[in-house]
Amino acid sequence: MKYLITLTTILIATVAMHAAVVTYVPDNTTVFKNPERGFTEEVSYKVSVNHPNVVKGSIGSTWGNKYNMTLAVVLYNFGKFKDADLPDAILNGFDEDMAELRSYGLKCVLRFAYTENENDIVDATPAWVQRHLEQLQPHLAANADVIYVIEAGFVGVWGEWYYTSNYGNESQHLNAKRRLVIDALFANAPADRFILFRYPMIKTEYFGDSTPLSSEEAFTGTVRARMGCHNDAFLNTWGDMGTYASDNLSDDPAVRQYVASETLYVPNGGETNIDDSETLAEQRYTRAPGEMSTYHWSFCGSSYALPVTRRWRESGLFDTLNIHMGYRYNLLDGQFSDEAAPGGRMNVTIRLRNAGYAPLYNERTAYLVLKNTAGQTWPIALTTDPRRWLPNYVQSAINEQVTIPADMPEGTYHLYLWLPDKYASIADNPKYAIRIANTGMWDAETGLNDLMTSVTISNTAPLDPGELPEVILNSLQATTTHAGTMKYVENGMLYLVRDGVRYTVLGQ
């Protein structure tokens, strides 16, 4: 005997998923602020107990507006403490400086050194560097939210691992003492921050391996995945003064290829240093876009050295570099379900490209935000990893099904894309959210990017039954216990859906 279902007590609904399609207009010309990228200025000071600050008093509310800067290179000169503990005043001053950056929506490229004078090459021993890093460790951890990257520092004049009294001559990228400093850096720096060294050969010699970082190991938090290089001799001679050579005299194509591959997964940046040759600057300043693109530059000094940076400004190249340095995301088009049920699922498909020279490096979650007419917002985390949106106009796609919260009220919700900082301390600050480079999308008050479409949330909208937990019922139970649910037939089988559960109905 077979039981019949009383259809008049069951709401019949379709499970077809309708989609709204939106085409976006890329903005390829506007220079605007975005976190963790772009031109920089340096602030530095030989700190003391009576003057423990580098940032405070040097950076104000209008700092960086001229060039839309969001990064400061912050260099602490510990020259007064080469063989002594850092006083509490210095450590507290560091915290004050980081709070100052936070108040202005800025981050730093951070470096420590013991001398900034080529006539004074006396730095601290490895034991004192380790001690200072141990003192700094809790302060670095507490302020990791406003540290973009850490440059290795400590060794040599300006912390550039060159002119030094304690660590061998300039041709030695690695020796036992330098290895001790590297170990101390990674033992005490925040585990989610990259550390950049002056020469790529420091990394290859440290690991005894010149194989570039793989996509699989990238962003895993290992020392290899967090170790990169910076170039403070950009466009100079001799392979950028040893950056691309193992002997500090030549220009090695193999090293250049290594850096080009590595910098898809670890940051790169620095400054020019052609400051004494107008002729050399004239010959080389136009090479910047090609080299920044190849080696995936995220940041560069805006002033030093003037023979080059002045030519960038005079020629209009400065804006080109400012537009493309780091990441720059253009949305191309999107498709979104135009209706969904609380507890159900909706489809999200977005095609985008990264028109910047570099990817994003620090972890960041992308959210689909639903906002109703009352101004209530519902952020839903996407599984896409923005660090994998590759640069130089490579296209990527977000193609996901997201679950609508079961307690979301019915109504019409506008859709936004939100890319906030991962740290709760600054996640709600729109200055730290990523702006998408498209016309008419950015809301500076909220840090949201308008996806220019809406979705209707309704209890009568179809769920996506294929993703629901399943309960098997016979047809009598279906008619007596679960009347009023949604009914549909698939492959000859009858299903009912209610409260986020799919019921398979078995006839007899």
Image (cartoon, grey):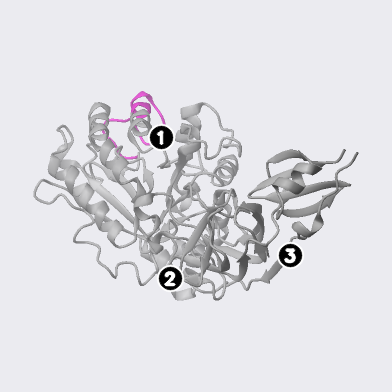
Does residue 373 appear anywhere in the picture?
yes
Q: Is residue 234 left or right of residue 353?
A: left
In the figure, is residue 211 to the left or right of 169?
right
On-image quarter of the N terminus: top right
Tell me the tag on residue 171: 1
Residue 176 falls in image quadrant: top left
In what element is the residue under mark 3?
Answer: loop
First-in-chain label (3 vs 2)? 3
Give the residue number, with chain letter if any, for mark 3: 18
Circle 1 SS class:
loop
Instruction: Please report contact status of discs 2 and 1: CB closer than 8 Å, yes or no.
Output: no
What type of secondary structure mainly makes up the magenta span?
loop
The residue drawn where x is 76% and y is 39% is 473
Task: Count up the numbered dots.
Answer: 3
Task: Point out the frontmost of discs 3 and 1.
Answer: 3
In the rendered image, is residue 15 in sight?
A: no
Q: Which residues are magenta?
A: 162-180
